[in-house]
Structures are given as structure tokens and as C-alpha cells.
Image (cartoon, rainbow, N blue to C red):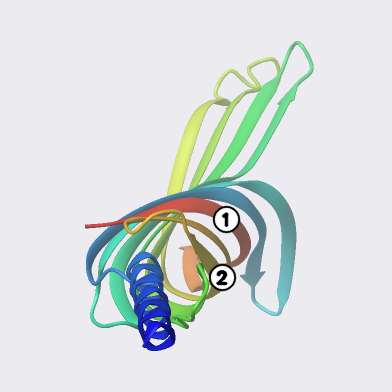
């Protein structure tokens, strides 16, 4: 009889422990918000007629997003990102110039989470939306010509796509640390006739996700 009671107690303890662990690791369905920062390895390409030139630049990228978990695996949301993609300046003490490029994007996204029995959740995702590339040029070459002073700004608006893969680590029921890789593509858009601009970004990000 005692052996039966001991066995029953052991089974009960195992069951309670399993339920508690499952409660800790269970995904939270509902709304979430996240923010991340990382490194962007970008390439900007300019095309005119049959010629093209490209330039690579490493820069900071920041991203915020919010969305909803539809079920245990599928999330949908909206994300916005900003990267000061390129900056170059020239100053010889007489003449000066500065050229900046900023990249903005807003995308609708969908993710698939591969939940398992650990605190680590791999995921993949894709997104589509709009990207804006802002070009700012300012200069002072008044020593050459008094009229060569001023600034100019142009923007291009692009169809934007992204692919993503990463992993989330569950810190608590509502908080996760997220590390991911994103490939962003900004389709051709006209800067000035006949120059078209396109761009790509390979980004590596680290951030936090909070589920409500």
C-alpha cells in the first residue's frame, strides 16, 4: 500500500512540474511590441541608360514594431525602420561639402514561430511595404563661384520587401530577447531623369519583444 502511495505522489509531482514548466514556456497569444537596433550592411546602386555604379556602406539601423499573435505559431504586424545609411563630408578650409543618405521603411510583416520545449524559439518571416531614401547635399564653393552655395534634397519612394530569420529567448512569460537577420530590398525608383536608384540591406539586429 505504501509503495502505491509513494508512486502516486511521485506521478503527481512530475505532473505538477510539467504543467509549471509548460506554463513558463507557453507562448503568449495576443498583442506584442518590440524594438531593436543593429548593423546594416547596405548597397546603393544608381543606374542611367546602360551604366550603373554602386557603393557599399556599413551603418546603424533601428527598428520598432507591433503586432498580434494569431495562434501559437503565426504573428502579423507592422514595422518601421530607420538607417542613416551614408554620410560623407569634404572641407579644405576654403570649400566644403556634405552628402547624407537616410533610409526609412514601413512594412507589413508576417512571422512563423517554431515553438518547442525550450526557451528558444526560432522563427522566419517576410514583409512588404514602402521604403524612402532621402538624399541631402549641401556645399559652399563660393571661392570658385559666389552662386555655388546652398543645399539640395531629393527623395525616392520604393516598393520594399524583406526576408527574416532569427531566434527569440524567453526571459519571462511576457518578455523575450530577439536576435535576427533581415534582407531588405528597395526596388528601382527614379531620382532624376534618367537616374534610377535601388538598394539592399543585410541587417543584424538585437532587441526586446514584450507581449501583452
Residue 37 falls left or right of residue 6: right
Give the mark toward the camera: 2 or 1: 2
Q: Quadrant of the N terminus?
A: bottom left
Which disc, if any, is residue 166? 2
Residue 83 seen anywhere in this rendered image of the structure: yes
Label 2 vs 1, first from the N-terminus:
2
Residue located at (54% from left, 23% from top): 147
Residue located at (74% from left, 57% from top): 56
Residue with the most extreme top position: 93
Badge 2: residue crowd in 10 Å (few <14, some 14–19, many ≥20): some
Evaluate if marks 2 and 1 touch, with contact meaning CB atoms under 8 Å apart.
yes
Q: Position of residue 89 (x, y in %)?
A: 69, 29
Residue located at (48% from left, 81% from top): 116
Q: Which residue is mark 1?
A: 205
Residue 185 falls left or right of residue 94: left
Residue located at (32% from left, 69% from top): 23
Q: Position of residue 70 (x, y in %)?
A: 23, 80
* In the foreground, 77 or 85: 77
Residue 192 seen anywhere in this rendered image of the structure: no
Amino acid at each position: 500500500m505504501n509503495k502505491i502511495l509513494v508512486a502516486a505522489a511521485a506521478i503527481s509531482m512530475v505532473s505538477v512540474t510539467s504543467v509549471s514548466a509548460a506554463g513558463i514556456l507557453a507562448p503568449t497569444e495576443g498583442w506584442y511590441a518590440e524594438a531593436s537596433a543593429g548593423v546594416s550592411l547596405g548597397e546603393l546602386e544608381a543606374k542611367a541608360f546602360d551604366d550603373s555604379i554602386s557603393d557599399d556602406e556599413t551603418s546603424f539601423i533601428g527598428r520598432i514594431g507591433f503586432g498580434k499573435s494569431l495562434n501559437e505559431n503565426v504573428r502579423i504586424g507592422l514595422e518601421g525602420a530607420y538607417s542613416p545609411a551614408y554620410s560623407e563630408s569634404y572641407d579644405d578650409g576654403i570649400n566644403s561639402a556634405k552628402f547624407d543618405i537616410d533610409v526609412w521603411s514601413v512594412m507589413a510583416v508576417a512571422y512563423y514561430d517554431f515553438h518547442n520545449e525550450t526557451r528558444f524559439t526560432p522563427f522566419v518571416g517576410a514583409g512588404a511595404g514602402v521604403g524612402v531614401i532621402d538624399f541631402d547635399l549641401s556645399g559652399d564653393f563660393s571661392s570658385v563661384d559666389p552662386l555655388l552655395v546652398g543645399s539640395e534634397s531629393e527623395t525616392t519612394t520604393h516598393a520594399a520587401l524583406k526576408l527574416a530569420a532569427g531566434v527569440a529567448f524567453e526571459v519571462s512569460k511576457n518578455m523575450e530577447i530577439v536576435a535576427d537577420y533581415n534582407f531588405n530590398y528597395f526596388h528601382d525608383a527614379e531620382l532624376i531623369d534618367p537616374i534610377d536608384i535601388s538598394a539592399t540591406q543585410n541587417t543584424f539586429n538585437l532587441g526586446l519583444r514584450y507581449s501583452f
